[in-house]
Amino acid sequence: MSEKIILTGDRPTGKLHIGHYVGSLRQRVALQNTGEFKKIFIMIADVQALTDNFANPEKVRESVAQVALDYLGVGLDSKKCTIFIQSQIPELTELTTYYLNLVTVSRVGRNPTVKSEISQKGFGESVPLGFFCYPVSQASDITAFKATTVPVGEDQKPMLEQAREIVRKFNEIYSPVLVEPEIYLAKKDACLRLPGTDGKAKMSKSIGNCIYLSDSAKDVRTKVMSMYTDPTHIHKEDPGHIEGNTVFTYLDAFCKKEHFERYLKDYSSLDELKDHYKRGGLGDVQIKKFLASILEEILSPMRERREEYAKDIPAVMEMLHKGSDAARETAAATLDEVKTAMHINYFK
Ligand code: TRP
C-alpha cells in the first residue's frame, strides 16, 4: 500500500451545505473508496471554529454533532476513516507553539483568505491573535498526521501554501521529519465556487442562501424554484444567458448524462439544454424542475442515512471519542519526532 495519507476537516459553525458537498465532501468519499490511502483523518475543527466564535461556545459544541452527522450522511465511513475532534488532541496546540517561530506576522497578514475573513468578519484593527494565527494551527493539523493529500475547498489554497512553507523551513532548520502536503481540489469550476441560491458568490448562513445537506425534500424544491436565474429572461421566448445563471451553474456541478434519460427526455446533454435556453423558448420553471429532481436524487439517500444516524447521537459521540483517541496517538508520535529534531527531548 502507498504511503498516501489524507487529513482534512471543517469548522463546526453550523450544518454543512451542498457547496461543501461539491467543493470537497464528494471528493473525500470518492478518495475513501479508492482504497489508495494508508490512512484517512477527518477532523472537526472546533479549536479553529472558536477562533472567531470564542464568545459562542454553545454554537460550536452543537455543531460538532451536526457536522459528524453530515459526514456520515454523505457516506464517510468510520471504518475507513478516523473522524475526530480537534480540541481533544492537545499535541496540535503544542506543535503550533513551535511552528509560530517559523512564520512572520507580515507573512500571515498577506494570506489572502485571512485578509478577506478579517474584513468579512468586521474585525478592523481588533483581530484576535488566536484567529490571526489559525493558518499556523492548520499547518499543525496537517503535519501532525504527515498528510500528503488535503481535500478541501479552493478557499483553503493559501493555508496549504502556508503549511508547505512551514514544513520546508522546519525540515531545513531541524531535520526532515515533516511531510509537504498537497491540496486536492474539485475538478470543475462550478464545484470550486458554488454560488448561493440568490446568485451571490458564496453560500452563507447569515445571508440565508444555502441548501443544506439536511434540508427536507420540500425545502430543497422551494429553494430551487426561487433560485436566481437570468433577470433579462422575462418571457419563455426571450433568449437567455447561461453565464451567472445559478441554475446552470448548479447543473454544471450536479448534472450527469443519465439524468436526462430519467428526468428530461427531450434533451440528451447539458450543452443541448444550454443552447435551447440561449436561443429562447425554454422556460426557467422547466430547468428548475430538472435541477430539483437531480438534487433530490443525490440528496435523498444522504438525508436518509443522516436521519438514521441522528437517532443515536451517543453512538456518534462514541465514534468521535474512539477516533479522537486514535488520532491522538498519531499526533503524539509526530510531536515526539518534532521535539527530538528540536533537541528538546531532555528525558528520552
Ligand atoms: N480551515 C478549514 C475550514 O475553514 C478547517 C480546517 C482546520 C482544516 N484545519 C484543517 C481543513 C486542516 C483541512 C486541513 O473549513
Image: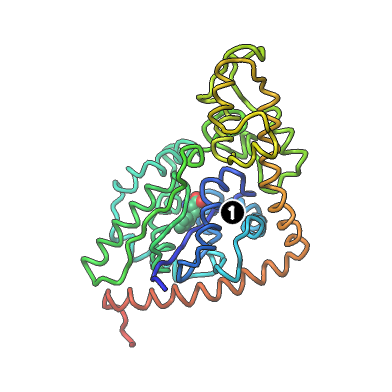
Name the residue at 54% across, 36% down.
252
Which sits in the foreground, 87 or 269? Answer: 269
| Among the 4 quarters of the image, the one containing residue 134 | bottom left
Query: How are the colours assigned in the image?
Result: rainbow
Name the residue at 41% across, 49% down.
132
Residue 105 image offset from top left, x and y in percent: 31, 49
Q: Is residue 68 left or right of residue 340?
A: right
In the picture, the quarter occupied by the C terminus is bottom left
Which sits in the foreground, 47 or 232? Answer: 232
**Residue ranking furthest to the left:** 172
- Can you identify the residue that label 1 sits on? 12
Residue 138 image offset from top left, x and y in percent: 42, 57
Q: Is residue 106 left or right of residue 284?
A: left
Q: Is residue 28 above or below residue 191?
A: below
Label tally? 1
Three-letter amino acid code of the residue under disc 1: Pro
Is ligand 1 within 8 Å of the beta carbon of the residue shown at mark 1?
no
Q: Is residue 329 left or right of residue 344?
A: right
Label 1 CA crowd tier, 10 Å (few <14, some 14–19, many 20+):
many
Name the residue at 46% across, 66% down.
36
| Among the 4 quarters of the image, the one containing residue 169 | bottom left
Name the residue at 73% across, 68% down.
314
